[in-house]
Image (tube, rainbow, N blue to C red):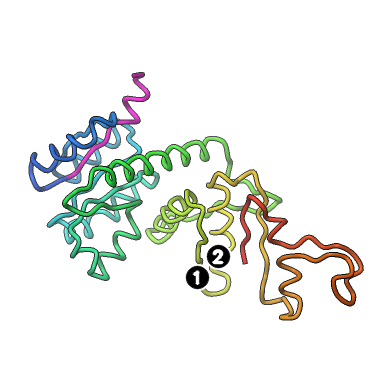
Amino acid sequence: MSSEMCMFRRLPMLSLRGPEAVEEVRRIAEPFFWEIVGVDDPDRLSRQVKRDQVRVALIDLRGAMQSAMSWLPAFCRQFPSLQLVAIIEKPQADNPAHASFLHAYFFDFCFAPIEPTRLTFSIGHAWTMARVADLHVASESACSLDGEAHEMVGRSEAMQAVRRQVRRYAGNHLPVLITGPTGTGKELAARSIHHQSDRTDKPFVAVNCGTLSPNLIQSELFGHEKGAFTGATKRRIGWVEQAQGGTLFL
């Protein structure tokens, strides 16, 4: 295995539960070529991430959720491209504050007792998305596509959380609901998801539904053939077809 692969596959794990918890994960992960490096405090985790330039880290939140809520936001601002995977107890996810925290700062999480297939899938997916983000940063400038900026600016905690969510959703082929008041950048977020996905070379079609007449929305979305109705003097390709293989933002 090359030195580069060794660096990429090294995986620090922060756990306050002692070496037994780290060893449990090590037994699961090592057959899949993950080198688990146990650490027992956030400062050591920070040094490990800096030294090894790791892309993914495991955080054992069992019995440590409250303390993590105090130190992790600053840690994530320091390492905005790092993908985090959590290990939690099922009751922790039922707490609304905990669920919101997990959603904001973690790429994925696994319940204890740990299911090996689930853990290795989460780690592998997080690592892949981190590599995709690396390639995107290396190949794309903060310049625009079609003359418009698609990179979000700002380094506040809220913006860092938005960027993590964008990276997370960019790896899925599922509908994404983006909410927010007018002018808060919903289309910008949609463009960022598109450009960080594997659809980046496909069309991005943005449609302002507020300007559509209810009588024409079907035709606008799906198109029509010449003569399909009164006034249809030529064939029209709908927005769904225009965005084929890419992203349709409504």
* Residue 186 circle label: 2
In the rendered image, the vertical position of residue 225 relative to residue 53, given as above or below: below
Say which residue appears at 37% left-offset and 58% top-offset: 157
129, 140: nearer the viewer = 129
In the rendered image, the vertical position of residue 104 relative to residue 76, given as above or below: below
- Counting other residues with Cα less than 10 Å from the Cα at mark 1, is it few (<14), some (14-19), or many (20 or more)? few
- Name the amino acid, label 2: Lys
In the rendered image, the vertical position of residue 108 relative to residue 176, given as above or below: above
Q: Position of residue 77 (x, y in %)?
A: 35, 51
Q: Does the stretch in magenta take in 38?
A: no
Which residue, as the protein is rendered here, is positioned at the far top? 2
Start-end of magenta stretch? 1-14
Q: Which of disc 1 and disc 2 is earlier in sequence?
A: 1
Which residue, as the protein is rendered here, is positioned at the far bottom? 214
Kindly indicate the quadrant of the structure image that contains residue 160: bottom left
Say which residue appears at 21% left-offset and 37% top-offset: 28
172 horizontally vs 64: left or right: right
- Write down the residue under mark 1: 179
Looking at the rendered image, the quarter that the C terminus falls into is bottom right
Say which residue appears at 41% left-offset and 41% top-offset: 130
- Name the amino acid, label 1: Thr
221 horizontally vs 12: left or right: right
Dot 2: what SS? helix
Disc 2 + disc 1, Cβ < 8 Å: yes
155 horizontally vs 215: left or right: left
175, 184: nearer the viewer = 175
Q: Position of residue 163 (x, y in %)?
A: 45, 54
